[in-house]
Image (cartoon, grey):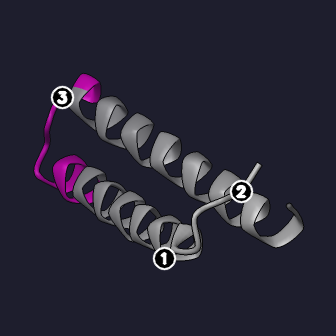
Amino acid sequence: MCLPEDLPVKGAILSVLASAFSTASVIANAAGASDVVIAILLLVAVVLLSIAVVMLVLDRFW
């Protein structure tokens, strides 16, 4: 199986997106948003970061 060459770049982009969602959840928390909104933002951040880590690990060890 051949992995795409731009896999680390895609992983880095997903990592930045995860950071943005995490920051948005902190801002939403400070603004007094409901717990559901904060949980959804954090869940999206965790999923994006998990995908980014898998992509970077695949690129490193495949």
Of discs 1 and 2, which sits in the foreground?
2
Of discs 3 and 2, which sits in the foreground?
2
**Residue at the top extreme?**
36
Residue 24 is situated, as x and y percent measured from the top left of the image, at 23, 57
Horizontally, residue 62 falls left or right of residue 58, namely right
Tell me which corner region of the image, top left, top right, bottom left or bottom right, holds residue 2. bottom right
Mark 1 falls on what kind of element? helix
Tell me which corner region of the image, top left, top right, bottom left or bottom right, holds residue 60. bottom right
Numbered mark located on residue 9 in the image: 1
Numbered mark located on residue 39 in the image: none
The residue carrying mark 3 is 34
> Residue visible at 48% across and 76% down?
9
Give the dominant element type of the magenta stretch: helix, strand or loop. helix
Mark toward the start of the polypeptide (3 vs 1): 1
> Residue visible at 30% across and 40% down?
41
The residue carrying mark 2 is 2
Mark toward the start of the polypeptide (1 vs 2): 2
Question: Looking at this view, is 12 or 5 the one in front?
Answer: 5
Mark 2 falls on what kind of element? loop
Question: Looking at this view, is 45 or 34 the one in front?
Answer: 45
Q: Is residue 38 above or below residue 18?
A: above
> What residue range appears in magenta?
26-36
Quadrant into which the C terminus falls: bottom right
Horizontally, residue 32 falls left or right of residue 22, namely left
Residue 17 is situated, as x and y percent measured from the top left of the image, at 34, 62
Horizontally, residue 56 falls left or right of residue 36, namely right
